[in-house]
Image (cartoon, rainbow, N blue to C red):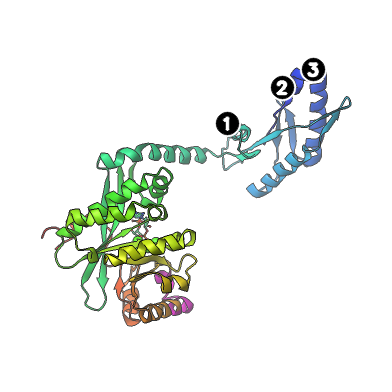
Amino acid sequence: LLFDLNNFAEVNDRFGRAMADALLVEVAARLRRSTRESDGIARLEGGEFAIIATRDIRPDQIRSLAKQIVDAMCAPFLIEKREIYCRVSIGIALAPADGLDTNQLLRCVDTALYRAKTPGAGSIQFFSPGDDEAAARRHALARDLPSALANDQLWLAFQPFLDLGSDRIRGFEALLRWQHPTLGPIPPSEFISIAEETGLIHAIGHWVVKTACLAAARWPRDLRVSVNLSVMQLKNKALLDGIVAALAEAGLEPRRLEVEITETVLISNFEETISLLQSLSSLSVTVALDDFGTGYSSLTYLRKLPLSRLKIDRSFVQDMLADADCAAIVRSLIELAHELRIEVTAEGVETLHQLDYLRRVGCDEAQGYLIGKPDRIDDIPGIAAK
Ligand code: C2E
Ligand code: CA
Ligand code: CA
Ligand code: CA
């Protein structure tokens, strides 16, 4: 741990060296009392101390040690009849996780302390070399995402839905892909949140809807196309107009477009979302509730939303053959949905056993690697050209 008495220089300037040194002696005494005897304490320059805790400690234990030290410094110091209050910061690095050699550990703990001293940060900060890499990558992605659209780095993969009654492909879900020029393929799980934070999700989301509609307009038969809408998109007043414009531009019948939303959006703005979804369904655009069963699934949603489809999350499909309770949930969900005239699609179907089971319990559609992985549409036989 690297401990810093933030106002050491201030005390030194205002009250002189002797007072500052007396304060350091008191600080050292409190450090000693709030640590164990086996912990090493060394005075560095200025108001800095290094504390080496050589016990076998977990990050949460080391945090509570740091907390103890911060608390110990809260009470004012009484030096030459003056009450002095101190602000302190602590940076932490862990061996061997953050580095095996002293130099690397020192760099980490130094950065941790630097961050602990920045206004607004907590007074206790950890730092690992990996933090920097992750932050740097996120920073690079946030920097490059705005030009990704303009430079044709985004593309849509399409994953088929299989109708379990007729054994025919009923349509495809559009899944966004980013081919970064130097970092390679970036998964949506990584960049959608960046797009949301930077507000780019609206432009990107509109591109997705437009591109998906244009693709579907070229497909044979009545194949449906589904697009995913995230929470932020659903809060945007321009979304509805964007969808209407995309449909018109592509000349796609609205009933061939489906939007997929997750429960998270319903928690924060239920009423607004309902009215948006109602507008969409009055245009004949259908609505699917995605990842069903993973969030705070409420039966209210099924009753109040204009839903055409429930997508049972992959985790249920994965476990249903090994876990009787899970199978019971899947069966009952299908039954309940059907009573409410809602179709059911099972996500993440990877084996024939799963497919057979879903067929037996009356599931309407299946989606998953067994049926087809998300792919470029011109690679899907029979769909490429009209
Ligand atoms: P999601 O909508 O639940 O999409 C299903 C995810 O599961 C996809 O991951 C798909 O590639 C993967 N998957 C499909 N079948 C299987 C299977 O059999 N086994 C396994 N293990 N995985 C399977 P992907 O493409 O990485 O997308 C992740 C999430 O990113 C999506 O989850 C969706 O929430 C979001 N997303 C994707 N495209 C868009 C988009 O255009 N807009 C928004 N807002 N979100 C998007
Ligand atoms: Ca989806
Ligand atoms: Ca899903
Ligand atoms: Ca999912």
**Residue receiving disc 2:** 9
Q: Quadrant of residue 285?
A: bottom left
Which image quarter has ligand 2? bottom left
Query: Residue 38 bears which disc, if any?
Result: none
Q: Looking at the figure, which quarter contains the N terminus? A: top right
Q: Is residue 320 magenta?
A: yes
Q: Is residue 44 left or right of residue 243?
A: right
How far across and down, in percent of the image, does residue 192 sit? 39, 49
Viewer-side label of 1, 3: 3
Amino acid type, label 2: Ala
Q: Secondary structure at mark 1?
A: helix
> Tag 1: residue type?
Arg
Residue positioned 25% across, 56% down in the render: 244
Q: Is residue 38 left or right of residue 362?
A: right
- Work out whether 353 lies above or below 25: below
Mark 2, ligand 1, within 8 Å: the answer is: no
According to the picture, the residue beneath numbered tag 3 turns out to be 16
